[in-house]
Structure formats: C-alpha cells, structure tokens
Amino acid sequence: DVASTWDAERIRTADKEFVIHSWSNQGAVNATPIAGGLGAWFWDYDGNRYLDFQSQLVNMNLGHQHPKMVEAIQAKAAEMCYIGPNYAERSRAELAELMAEVTPGDLKMSFFTTGGAAANENAIRLARHVTGRQKVVARYRSYHGATAGAIAMTGDPRRWHAEPTPSGVVRMFDPYTYRCSAGHPDPCPVCTGGPHLEEILQYEDPTSVAAVILETVTGTNGLLPPPPGYLQSIRETCDKYGILLILDEVMAGFGRTGEWFACDNYDVTPDILITAKGLNSGYVPLGAMTVNEEISGWLMKNKFWGGQTYAGHPLACASGVASIEIMREEKIVENSREMGQRLRAGLDGLAERHPSIGEIRGLGLFQGVELVKDRSTREPLVPFNAVGPAAAPMGAIVAAAKKQGLYLSANNNVLRLTPPLVIGAEDIDLAVGILDDVLGIADEAAAT
Ligand code: PLP
C-alpha cells in the first residue's frame, strides 16, 4: 500500500526538499505535517490538537471539514468537475445570483476568480476601463495580494520585494487612531478620511484617478476598523470626483466582523466589492469581484477584458453556494457577533492584568491586540517590520500558545484573533485562558 508509506516523517521530508513555501527562506521552514481537522480544531500526526485561532489564513470561516461543504463539493464533482467559463453553469449562476442577494446596496454582477489577488487585479483593470482614468489611491497599511497589480497596491513591506511594481498607485495614510500619522488633532484630517483624500487628489489631479481601494477593516496590517464616519467621508469624496470606491473584503467579508460584510457596519456600499476567503472558507480556491448596477450596465455595452481558465470553477462555485446556505441556516453571522462579544469581554479582562496590552480593537471575530512596552508612550513591543531578536517576543508568544494548543498569529506588534465563525463559547474561553498565560511573556519583555 503506497499510501501507508506516507507517514508524518515522509511528508515532512518531502515537504522540506520539494515544496516551496510562501514568504519563507526555505532552509528555515520546518512545517508540521497535519493529519486532519474538524470545526475550530486541527491536529498533527503526533496527536497534538490545535484550536485554530487564525482560521488558517483567516479564510476558514466555517471551520474545517464542514459536512455540508464536503457533501456539496462531492456532489458537484460527481456531476461535473469542470466546464469552461464561456458556458452557463448551474453553480456559477446560482452563486452569482446569491451574491447579488447577500451583498449590500445595488451590488449585482460577479466575476469569479481563484482568489483575492486575481479579483483585485480585475477590479482595477475594470475601474480603469469604466472611468477612462489611470491612477489608483491605496493605503500603506494594506495587503491586496501577491500578483503584480495587487502587490503594487499593497502597502505591506512584502511590496518592497516585488519592486519595481507597475506605476499608477498613489498612497494615502491609514485611519490608525492609536498611532495616527497626523498626530490625531481633533478633528483629524487623516482619520476623518475625506480631507486627507481631498488633499492627495488636489496634488494628483482628481480627473486622473480611477479608484480608491481600501480594506474596509484592515486585516493583516494591524486589524484597524475605521473610526465612525470615515468610510462615508471617503465615499462622498469619491462621488464628488467620479472616482470608484473598491472595498477589499477578502478577509473582512462574509460574517467575519459580525455583519455579512464589513461595510454593512458603516452603511457604505462600494462600487466594487472584492471577496474571497470566507466566500467559501477556502474549500476550493475562489474569489469574486461584485460590481454595482451602474458598472453592470456598463458591462452590458462594453467588453470585459479579463478572464481565467478557472473563472467560476464549478467546484468552487458549488462550495460557495453551500457556504452561503450554511451561513443562513446556522446563523453564522449572529454567532460571529455573539462570540466576538464574548472574546472581547475576555480580552478586556486580560487588559486589566497585562500592562503590555496597549489597545484591543476589532469587530465580531476579527479582533486584534496591540502590544506595547509602555502604555503611556505607546512604544510598540517590537519595532515595525522587525526580524530576528528584535521580533523575538512576538514569536515567543505565538510559539508558547501553540505549545498549549492555541494556533494564533502576529503581525508586527499586533496579535490577530480570528477563529472560525462556527466557534463555541467553551473554545473562546479556553483561548482567553491560554492568552492570559502567554501574555506573561509580553509583560516580561516590556519590563526589560
Ligand atoms: N486582500 C486581502 C485583504 C487579503 O487579506 C488577502 C490575503 O490575505 C488578499 C487580498 C489576497 O488574497 P489571495 O491570497 O487569495 O490572492
């Protein structure tokens, strides 16, 4: 039996020798072979179980191996694994119709891709064609994907290693109220949104700008929900100059923030909404670009210059349909809200005991804990983009948590707490208990 020779050691060895891992020096990779998962948990071959407080890459909103998801993919595979995007296909049509139903406002037609970056690429190209303009305004604290255009819009230092990137991206500051670039005077031009954008547009020529692209709630780069009024203000400024608003909800969409979409928290509808990850919990690669009525109308009269062999892949779309049905049947959005409140209450309790907690922020099950050396100066526990010993305390916290069975992640000095939206109260409490323990490492590092 060939399969039986693939024990943990063989997997580890072959992985190390032949697999190129993302964003890594391959010599330093020591990936744990994983044997399985269920719900909010996954486990290795040695019987170690991990509570998945990352939802892997913040994509497994429905958790591991949801039986209805597996069933939907199996049923579609038995029926038809693939048909070209030029045909009409049941799951693709059904998912597109459902997207128009669940997304806010007048968002209507969808183009399905294999992930978030590809959806963003298409959004930018389409925005350029629709407006006849070239420039795009994006923010520093952002991640939009690893392909040429998406990484050019990305502010995250991963962009540095993709340079030279395509031109035409103009950068704006983020509404990071805890560390405001403008010093946060009241009212703050950056954190209120519109005034900062207006100033940039004045220097750039507003008639040259096709789109503003934002993560509705910044994910990877600090977990930053915008202050009240920010998105409305950006929306108004975009409207004033005929600029399209693209909201990237690859991480924040599909219940993550305790609403169906993060923009529902702010009553703002983008012209183009980008989703992936939670769209089908990553069971099959899938992303989507969903456009409003006006752009849908434009597309009826003009050519869409985009495509992929796997655009609207039937297995992916079938899992997307199943995912939306599960979200409705199992009240996933409500659970995200409720468990988010429970998590937040637990974290607030930790802040009373751990002086290294500078700020806790987030919505629903999209929570971040910013760690500092000193609450009064807000000096970050580790410097921006630190590597090696300078970043050690964050790595030590993540490693200590993993040892206790809690899988979490950190970006700079911010811990990201993003469990599957199917998680229950017991697992939330378990995670808070482990965090209480491992945050001692942060307190100690802050004190030295
Ligand atoms: N946009 C955001 C906000 C993301 O967080 C990510 C991935 O983490 C992407 C886009 C890129 O998505 P993908 O990795 O599916 O290309």
Image (cartoon, rainbow, N blue to C red):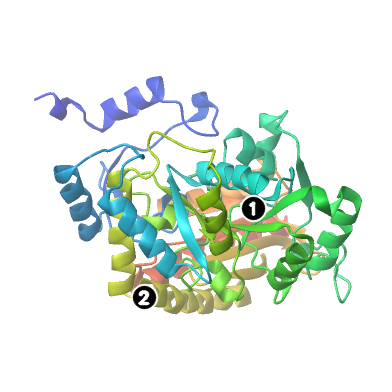
In the image, 134 versus 295, the foreground residue is 295
- Measured in 3D between alpha carbons, the distance from the residue under mark 1 to the one under mark 2, in whole angstroms, is 27 Å
Judge whether 153 appears above or below 381 on screen: above
Residue furthest left as drawn? 1
Residue linked to disc 1 = 221
Element type at mark 1: loop
Which part of the image, by quadrant, shows the N terminus? top left
- Residue 409 image offset from top left, x and y in percent: 52, 52
In the image, 438 versus 52, the foreground residue is 52
Is 36 situated left or right of 186 in this image? left
Residue furthest top as drawn? 17
Is 261 situated left or right of 65 in this image? right
- Residue 107 image offset from top left, x and y in percent: 51, 64
- Residue 131 image offset from top left, x and y in percent: 69, 50
Amino acid carrying mark 2 in the image: Ala
What residue lies at 86% left-to-right and 76% top-to-bottom?
Answer: 187
Q: Is residue 231 visible?
A: yes
Foreground: disc 1 or disc 2:
1
Residue linked to disc 2 = 425
Element type at mark 2: helix
Amino acid carrying mark 1 in the image: Asn
